[in-house]
Image (cartoon, rainbow, N blue to C red):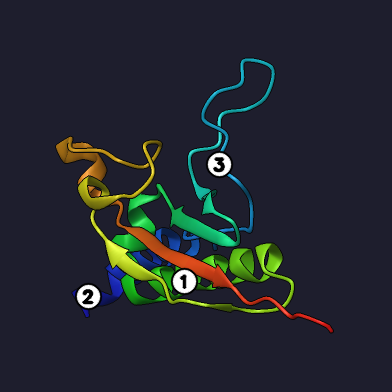
Amino acid sequence: MSALRFLPLLFILTAGCTPLSYQAVNLDGPDSELQTSGYIDKEVSEDVHVIEVRYEYRAAFVFQHEKTLSELKSVWHQRANALCSKGYQGEPEVIRPDEARTDEFYCTLNVCQKYPVVSGIAYCKATYEL
């Protein structure tokens, strides 16, 4: 019976886990709002993109860990589709921030280790016409 008292608290905590929206991070910009959750991509060679996604919201990883990772992977695929209009090869993987491929998401501090990064390389497909 006493466990039922904690049900409203659990509902409040999990209700606050909002899904990650498809948006780029904004880490520098005095004129615009700082946005630390989202995706970042870099073209490392022609039609080859490093894409990384993170979500800096601790409750999402505590209460809905697998769902949150799934949403991060979904954002990764959405970004790969946007960058590669003819399709792509590659899959995201979950890594620690001290393994990040981008300088913006690379972090060795204990505080950032709470937020895994979904990272991968998208190789865009090309269609050639003769």
Q: Earlier in the sequence, mark 2 or mark 3?
A: 2
Of the pair 18 and 72, the residue shown nearer to us: 72
Where residue 20 appears, x then y in whole percent? 55, 59
Mark 3 vs mark 1, CA separation in Å: 16 Å
- Which quarter of the figure is the C terminus placed in? bottom right
Q: Earlier in the sequence, mark 1 or mark 2?
A: 2
| Vertical order, 113 against 92 (above or below) | above
Of the pair 46 and 16, the residue shown nearer to us: 46
| Vertical order, 74 against 53 (above or below) | below
Where residue 59 appears, x then y in whole percent? 35, 56
Give the label on residue 3, or none: 2
Mark 1: secondary structure: helix
Residue at 29%, 68% (x, y): give it: 5
Q: Is residue 65 left or right of residue 26?
A: left
Q: Earlier in the sequence, mark 3 or mark 1?
A: 3
- Which quarter of the figure is the N terminus placed in? bottom left
Taking the view exactly as shown, the residue that stands out farthest to the right is 130
Q: Amino acid at mark 1?
A: Lys
Mark 2 vs mark 3, CA separation in Å: 40 Å
Where residue 74 appears, x then y in whole percent? 54, 73
What is the crowding at mark 2: few (fewer than 14 residues within 10 Å), some, or many (at least 20)?
A: few
Pointers 1 and 2 in contact (C-beta within 8 Å): no
The residue carrying mark 3 is 25
Mark 3: secondary structure: loop
| Vertical order, 109 against 13 (above or below) | above
Q: Amino acid at mark 3?
A: Val
Pointers 2 and 3 in contact (C-beta within 8 Å): no
Pointers 3 and 1 in contact (C-beta within 8 Å): no
Residue at 52%, 66% (x, y): give it: 76
The residue carrying mark 1 is 73
Where residue 40 appears, x then y in whole percent? 52, 48
